[in-house]
Amino acid sequence: MEFHVENMTCGGCARGVTRAIQAVDANAKVIADPPNRSVKVETTATQQQVADALSEAGFPPR
């Protein structure tokens, strides 16, 4: 699955996004791309679970 995260602008943000996703699924593979503000995720969690975790961490996805 892929998300657009408008306020992910740097490496620190990317680490926060990764931590939020891995809090839902510790084995998730996360590829964060701050310049394009995109996050690709391979996980067993649902898209809604990942979106909720991102929102709670301050990175609401579109």
Image: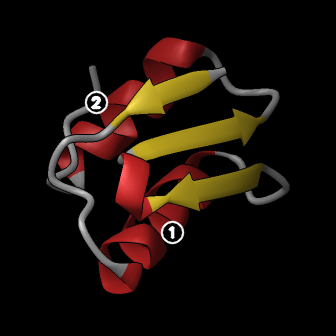
Q: Secondary structure at mark 1?
A: helix
Image quadrant where one finds the C terminus: top left
Q: Which mark is residue 62?
A: none
Of the image marks 1 and 2, the number of the one nearer the N terminus: 1
Residue extending furthest front? 35
- Identify whether 54 is placed above or below 2: below
Which is nearer the eye, 13 or 57? 13
Question: In percent of the image, x 66 and y 20: which residue is there?
Answer: 1
Which is nearer the eye, 49 or 17? 17
Where residue 37 sits in the image (x, y, percent)? Answer: 36, 47
Left or right relative to 21: residue 41: right
Q: Could you tell me the amino acid type at mark 2?
A: Pro
Reading the image, the residue beneath label 2 is 61
Question: In percent of the image, x 69 and y 54: which residue is there?
Answer: 30
Left or right relative to 43: residue 1: left
**Disc 1 versus disc 2: distance between alpha carbons?**
15 Å
Where residue 48 sits in the image (x, y, percent)? Answer: 45, 14
Neighbour class for label 1 at 10 Å: few (<14), some, many (≥20)? some
- Identify whether 56 is placed above or below 48: below
Neighbour class for label 2 at 10 Å: few (<14), some, many (≥20)? many
Q: Secondary structure at mark 2?
A: loop
Q: Could you tell me the amino acid type at mark 1?
A: Arg
Q: Nearer the viewer, mark 1 or mark 2?
A: 2
Question: In percent of the image, x 34 and y 85: which residue is there?
Answer: 12
Where residue 35 sits in the image (x, y, percent)? Answer: 38, 60
Question: In percent of the image, x 54 and y 51: which residue is there?
Answer: 21
Left or right relative to 23: residue 61: left
Reading the image, the residue beneath label 1 is 19
Please count the marks in the image. Answer: 2
Left or right relative to 15: residue 26: right
Toward which corner of the image does residue 60 lie, by quadrant?
top left
Which is nearer the eye, 52 or 37? 37
